[in-house]
Image (tube, rainbow, N blue to C red):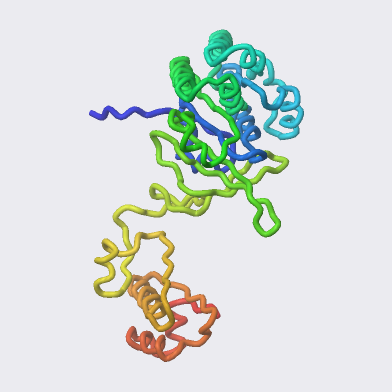
Amino acid sequence: MSNKLNIRRLPTGVPGLDSLLGGGIPEFSFNLIAGTPGGGKTTLAHQIMFSQANPNNRALFFTVLGEPALKMLRYQQQFPFFDINKVNESIRYVNLSADLMEGDFDCVLSRIAEEVKDYAPSLVFVDSFRSVVQSAKHMKQGASELQHFVQQLGMQMTSWQATTFLIGEYLTPETESSPVFTVADGILWLTQNLQRNSTVRKIQVVKMRGQAQVPGLHTFRISDEGIQVFPRAIVQQGAAVGSANKVSTGKQRVPMGVPGLDEMLGGGLPAGYSLLLVGPSGSGKTILATEFLAEGVRRGEPGVIAAFEKPQPDDEQSAVYAGHGWTSRGDQHALSGFVD
């Protein structure tokens, strides 16, 4: 009998993002959407919210000292995911600026608890949560008070069965000092950088408790349709992300065709992997690649040689071909594709 708990995963409504998260956002989780200014944090939060919100699955969006709700709605309603009929029906906006300016963490937490109890949302968003932190520093509240506030907020949201998203502008060094990053169940990091005079946006799933996410940086785009993520083609849990083709990453391994090398690799190269051969001139890169190709042919798996510098087999390659019974150019083409 298995005691495994299956946590429901909520689809984000963002093309390409669910595959990075391992299937979606865990229900009742406490998440942080962080990054630099202009990274797309607020847009991502709204796209998730409008995708999930309905009369039976309501959302509560708290604004603090960032953009006013009216200004925020003005820009977000340009996207097709925005549904004006959901505002004030399935989605409610609440401003916490006055509570934060007049009181402390306890005052803010009390107001959030009051609104959540009254509206009973399934989704809760706080934008910008970093404004809460900055105001706390201004009011000389220490890190211990902030950590207590974050822990209390996380526990209350979980007990209220609400999936929570804190949105904030953070710099990389702050990830080591802010308690928010420790308490959060999931962290999405959004950045934008200039590369060759073009703006490139990246998203990283830094953390997602309880499920295997796809690591690394992935490109995303903000267009008239909203946010779309383009996952890198990484083999993850037996599947190539972004591809319908299943690739085994378990026991299935491909022989290299070189005696002793398969043992060094733990049984061969895992099926579906990309392998980079690096070394100085004359170290045997071409011979090793040809041996691998020949082993595939012996197993009934034709291959392709894409030659950029050697359109005709040299003496070294010809000797390898002859050793495998490839006595002519025609034999080589019959067994493998040669692109020059």
Q: In the image, is residue 100 above or below residue 221?
A: above
105 lies left or right of 276: right
121 lies left or right of 336: right
Q: In the image, is residue 252 above or below residue 99?
A: below
Q: Position of residue 156 (x, y in %)?
A: 46, 16
Q: Quadrant of the N terminus?
A: top left
In the image shown, does 266 or 97 lie closer to the viewer? 97
Q: Quadrant of residue 261?
A: bottom left
In the image shown, does 32 or 161 lie closer to the viewer? 32
59 lies left or right of 213: right
Q: Quadrant of the C terminus?
A: bottom right
- The answer to whether any part of residue 198 appears in the image is yes
Q: Residue at x 59, y 26 (%)?
A: 134
Q: Residue at x 60, y 19 (%)?
A: 60
In the image shown, does 144 or 279 lie closer to the viewer? 144
77 lies left or right of 276: right
Q: Position of residue 178 (x, y in %)?
A: 49, 32
Q: Residue at x 46, y 45 (%)?
A: 214
Q: Position of residue 14 (x, y in %)?
A: 59, 38
Q: Residue at x 66, y 14 (%)?
A: 98
- The answer to whether any part of residue 158 appears in the image is no
Q: Position of residue 324 (x, y in %)?
A: 33, 83
Q: How many marks?
A: 0
Q: In the image, is residue 67 above or below residue 340?
A: above
Q: Quadrant of residue 293?
A: bottom left
